[in-house]
Amino acid sequence: MKPAALILGATVVSGGTGYLVTGVVAASVDVADYTVFAVAWSALFLVVGALGGVQQELARATSSTPAEGRGEDAARGRSRASVFAAAVAGLVAVVLATSAPLWAPPLLGSAAVSGATALIVGAAGYVIVAAVCGVLYGVEAWRPLAVMIAIDGVLRLALVGVVLVVDGPVEALLWAIAAPFALAVVLVGPFVAGRLRRSRVDVGLAALSANTARTVVAAAATATLIAGFPAVLRATDPLAPESLIGPLVLVLTMTRAPLVIPVMAMQSYLVVRFRTDIGVAGRRAFALSALVMLVAAAVAALLALVGPALFGAIFGSAYALEGAIMAGLVASSGFVAALAITGPALLARSQHSIVTLGWVVAVVGVVAALLMPLPLTERVLVALTIGPVLGLAVHAVALARRPPKIGKAPSAPEDARPPGTETSS
């Protein structure tokens, strides 16, 4: 099986299980509990999305070590990923734990203590998952990578199913969505250890940390527009009733996920592929972006016709929004998906700052729109359209220009460039 098909298949499994979890929980609990669950899910995957920058940078900086080169230098190159992942995991846990009194009560309400603990454990566990996946991307170990991508979603679906069967409290649901990251490492780690030992990180810890910091900022902005948007919506309007927030979040999640999540999960793969021919990366990114926006428009037209009846039949009348609203949410997802394509093209050209700028501009546009004096639904539609369009304009301008000489990029010294970045035009 071709690598793209293999990774896409694993991504479909991962995204599909998350899709099922969201739908099953919405259909099984009341609107108030679903809103707590959905905001917690959003907060967790906001952090996870930000930490995806760890995976992207390790994918970019990792290469296979030839058999004749597996000496002391190669061992140091391998150890960098382990040291880096452990340090980032510890830092994430400390930052979230110390800041929890600020964000947990308004987001999680009565589930603040248990929910915050679950989110901290889940976020730290994801750092290790991201590091392992990044290294596997870098050495192009597609089969074990596909397993790693798919397994935590399968575990999450199983655990959530158990909690719902025994009628557990919402706090148990929060642990069920957070624990699978650590469990995935325990289950898959022994089977990928050999691949990890045959890899090396060709960038020093200082450069790797600096590059990752920039990429994490961009990834955090990315996550804010996608998985983290419900948490941001709740934070900007904490008094909005669950009867409004819950249905809007469910429709947003269920209608955008099939398009945006697969593109997001393919970002590290796109970085690896774009870097093989830097000169045409921009044209390829524009073509893929146009394709996903056309798909979004087609799905939007379909949901405008059948969406309200479909949601009403599956989840109940409380979750059925107007067809025009559903269509607007899906159409806006095309711009977000396009940003998730142009970003890797710029990363492949070592233009980290432009990637970050585009996503930050998009987030600023979203937050500004959410603070406008408009009804909730209108604010959401305006925010999810204006923000991504502004960010996409930043990326498009940069990609239209001549790519920089990668060898002169500040991200790595001349003798430590990731493989495939030597090409310039």
Image: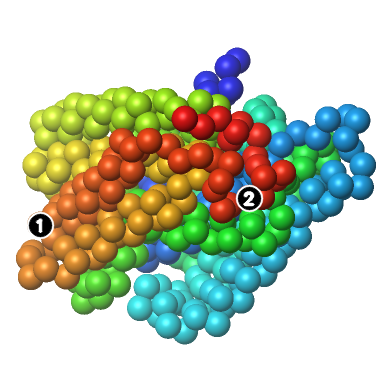
Residue sitting at x 56%, y 76%: 95
What label sits on residue 378 in the rendered view? 1
Q: Secondary structure at mark 1?
A: helix
Residue sitting at x 81%, y 35%: 65
Q: Which amino acid, mark 1? A: Glu
- The answer to whether residue 349 is left or right of residue 123 is left
Residue sitting at x 42%, y 77%: 103
Look at the picture and state if 266 lies above or below 347.
Answer: above
> Which quadrant: the N terminus?
top right
Which tag is nearer the camera, tag 2 or tag 1?
2
Tell me which corner region of the image, top left, top right, bottom left or bottom right, holds residue 109.
bottom left
Look at the picture and state if 346 lies above or below 352.
Answer: above
Picture coordinates of residue 132, whole percent (x, y): 68, 46
Residue sitting at x 15%, y 39%: 327
Picture coordinates of residue 11, whole percent (x, y): 50, 34
Q: Secondary structure at mark 2?
A: loop
What label sits on residue 226 in the rendered view? none
Q: Looking at the picture, tell me which residue is in the foreground, 156 or 391.
A: 391
Is residue 178 visible to the viewer in this orientation of the structure?
Answer: no
- The answer to whether residue 110 is left or right of residue 316 is right
Q: Residues within 10 Å of mark 2 (few under 14, many from 20)?
A: many
- The answer to whether residue 5 is left or right of residue 252 is right
Tell me which corner region of the image, top left, top right, bottom left or bottom right, holds residue 346.
top left
Look at the picture and state if 211 lies above or below 269.
Answer: below
Q: Looking at the picture, tell me which residue is in the foreground, 24 or 234.
A: 234
Picture coordinates of residue 388, whole percent (x, y): 25, 49
Q: Which amino acid, mark 2? A: Ala
Q: Earlier in the sequence, mark 2 or mark 1?
A: 1
Picture coordinates of residue 375, whole percent (x, y): 8, 64
What label sits on residue 412 in the rendered view? 2
Q: Residues within 10 Å of mark 1 (few under 14, many from 20)?
A: some
CA distance separating discs 2 and 1: 45 Å
